[in-house]
Amino acid sequence: MSKMFPTLFSPGKIGNLTLKNRICKAPQSSGMNNKDGTVSERAIRYYRDQALGGAGMIIVEYAYVDEIGSKSAHCHLGISSDEHIPGLAWLAENIRECGSVPAIQIEHCGRQKFLGTQPICAASEIPWPMLWNKVGVQSVPHALTIEEIQDVVHAFGDAALRAKIAGFELVEIHGAHGYLLTNFFSPTTNHRTDLYGGSLENRMRIYLEIYRDVRKKVGPDFPVTIRVSGTDYEPDGFPIEDTIALAKALAAEGIDAIHVSGGDHHTMIHQVTPMALSVCHNTWAAERIKKEVNIPIIASGSITLPQYAEEILSSGKGDFIGLGRPLWADPEWANKAAEDRPEDIRPCIRCNEGCLERTFFQYKAVTCALNPVISREGELKMQPATKVKNIAIVGAGPAGLEAARVCAQRGHQVTIFEKQSRKGGLLNEASAPEFKADIRPYMQYLITAVEKLGVKIIEKEATLADVEKFDAVICATGSEVANPNIPGKEKSLVTNALDVLNGKVKVGKNVVVAGGGLVGSETAIHLAEQGHHVTVVEMLPRIMNDVATTDFLAYSEKIAKTDMAIKTSAKVTAIEDDGVVIESKAGKEKLAADTVILALGFKSRNDLYEQLQAAGKEAYVVGDAVKPGKIFDAIHTAYRLGVRI
């Protein structure tokens, strides 16, 4: 048992199923299976790595239960046919061989069908707004008849039996996140007037019928759990009191545990919480439900660090911890926590760039901004270097630190040159706002990793002479603020976003931010939340064009609560002593300002790389030195170079 996290690694039991620890892999779609829903070898590799990481139970991503309308997304795992059983058995056996309990979640997507194709089935003819915006009238679901509802009920039961036959040791019914069951449960999406609509008793009826059919088919001793949303966070949706009533009813029926999450796809920021929202975001709901039932509760949602998990368990807010994104960031999360090595855990920063954005909006297999191996297990894993090299890395930002970590771990001798006294590069500025605080433990993880590996760090701006004797040089020299050609840019009231975020300048009451991209918008929100009056001027029709979807939603809510103005389709054409002149289709306008902040992009620093190339040296470039981008780009370019150099 871990000395630091004793409750987390004490024995746990769900139904008649005893687990070696209290960490469960929470199910999330991977996009790695075959088009027909069968298990792929790629998915096997992925789940083997997840199981080897030490979680007590792996709940496999949701699997669709019928061939009519339950399939949600591309390469979605299926359990709708007996022909899925051989692959599922292969998957369950691999998870078990790797030391974890194999479980699976079964699901009907309801109105949230990312495929955007009919048939789409739900409780009522109320479309998912995001899908409506994408495909229009085609998104309107068919309201299931009572006979069709019974077909769905039996499909869940049949799917659960297939799971048992395949060798899974637990089945979880997906009753959360805006999928079919919550389409019945939420007044937002259920406008029925029959025995499946109206009263709470009617709206929860399908849950009880599905559980009874599942239980009848898998038998009395097979563990069955359900995932619920504490609330859907919809203004006219279901409150926690409704979910507590549902939990009590399911507990009375004999369900073995309740897995508590929150939100739906319309309120996605509460389902797949970005870093702008609180950690352990839905734990409050798990705690409320646990007080009302006498069965185990699985708490989940943004539980990024072991200390958060330990507090949830030790304080009695939950009996088990469900981890989704944190096990993508570091599949060995559980092993490292059990070994009292939390500093070695690569912590999820809830950026949603590699997971949510890719799977939901780009139709790709999941990956992780911080862990490029996810979805490419077996392809990008580190191997010992065949030829040990003496490598110089110029720059200790995220790309430089990641390249150093990987190269040193492979056995190379690594020296970092960094001109600043601090390490972490632009991660320091990126993590300055409190709503970006998740980046701080990740930055410390990178620094700790290179220190533990014995990487030498020299505080000096590297020159060609400094690095010419190394076998290879990796230029992680980053980027610098672009210098736009705006009259008056040299005036004393003008600064840039980085100098604001790192505290080098004092900002006045009235602020104009020129540029409404990621950096400009985050800087503006940061200042507005501190009480400044901020106006953002952006050339494009809207701000935040380069931010993740969940960040856009979370930031929009923040902006609505602050003293912040936005001028789009406009640009700053001149800076004067007391403000700026902007131009738009409406003409010229003067904006008063005490401080003008330029956030008009970055340009790569690659002078040293060009010198090395001209000198014929073995040289590489990673991160912003390739092209200014996000953490995802810095880490992926650095890791991929590190595993092959």
Image (cartoon, rainbow, N blue to C red):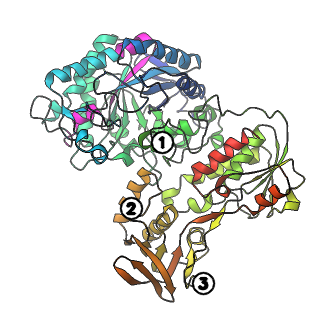
Residue 582, picture quadrant: bottom left
Q: Amino acid at mark 1?
A: Arg
Which SS class for mark 1? helix
Residue shown at the point (71%, 59%) measured from the top left? 477
- Please indicate, yes or no, whether residue 301 appears anywhere in the rendered image: yes
Q: Which residues are magenta?
A: 160-189
Q: Quadrant of the N terminus?
A: top right
What is the CA distance from the residue labelled 3 to the residue labelled 1?
41 Å
Queried whether the magenta region covers residue 201, the answer comes back as: no
- Which badge, 2 or 3, is on the more N-terminal residue? 3
Secondary element under disc 2, as helix, strand or loop, is: helix
Tell which circle, 3 or 1, labels the residue nearer the N-terminal end: 1
What residue do we see at 41% from left, 56% from top? 552
Check whether the beta carbons of the residues at disc 2 and disc 3 lie within 8 A of each other: no
Q: Amino acid at mark 2?
A: Lys
Q: Which residue is mark 2?
A: 558
